[in-house]
Image: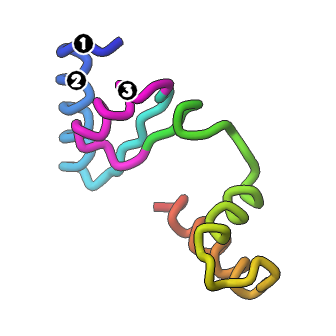
């Protein structure tokens, strides 16, 4: 639902979480309208079918590496560094 009440609730939850030093993740983002609403509310991260289907960490790593055209996809050291970076970011 994309109501003003939902926007206020999302914004308030995000503000409380941020004041406690927590990072927010919006779940169930199924369309552009939902993504816009959580983005405008300051939510740091989001997940849902509109953003991407569930996949393995290995697939995510491959997609991230594919965005870096100057690095060969067979560079296993770089791949390991990307995996470490993603794992560290997930722990935050």
**Distance of label 3 from label 1 (alpha carbons):** 10 Å
The residue beneath circle 1 is 3
Q: Residue 56: image x %, image y %?
A: 76, 51
Is residue 40 a member of the stretch shown in magenta? Answer: yes
Q: Are marks 3 and 1 in contact (CB under 8 Å)?
A: no
- Numbered label attached to residue 50: none
Give neighbour class at mark 3: few <14, some 14-19, many 20+ (Cα, 10 Å): many
Q: Earlier in the sequence, mark 3 or mark 1?
A: 1
Relative to 13, is 9 above or below?
A: above
Q: Residue at x 77, y 85 (%)?
A: 75
Q: Residue 4: image x %, image y %?
A: 18, 15
Residue 54 located left or right of residue 48: right
Relative to 20, is 91 above or below?
A: below
* Magenta segment boundaries in residue numbering: 30-45
The residue beneath circle 2 is 7
Residue found at the far front of this picture: 69
The residue beneath circle 3 is 34
Residue 25 located left or right of residue 89: left
Front in this rendered view, residue 16 or 29: 29
**Nearer the viewer's eye, disc 2 or disc 3?**
3
Q: Secondary structure at mark 2?
A: helix
Q: Residue at x 82, y 81 (%)?
A: 74
Relative to 79, is 49 above or below?
A: above
């Amino acid at each position: 639902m994309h109501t003003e009440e939902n926007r206020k609730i999302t914004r308030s939850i995000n503000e409380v979480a941020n004041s406690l030093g927590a990072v927010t993740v919006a779940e169930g983002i199924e369309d552009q309208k939902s993504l816009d609403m959580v983005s405008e509310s300051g939510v740091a991260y989001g997940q849902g079918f509109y953003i991407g289907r569930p996949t393995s960490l290995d697939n995510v790593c491959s997609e991230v590496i594919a965005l870096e055209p100057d690095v060969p996809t067979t560079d296993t050291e770089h791949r390991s560094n990307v995996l470490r970076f993603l794992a560290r970011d997930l722990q935050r």
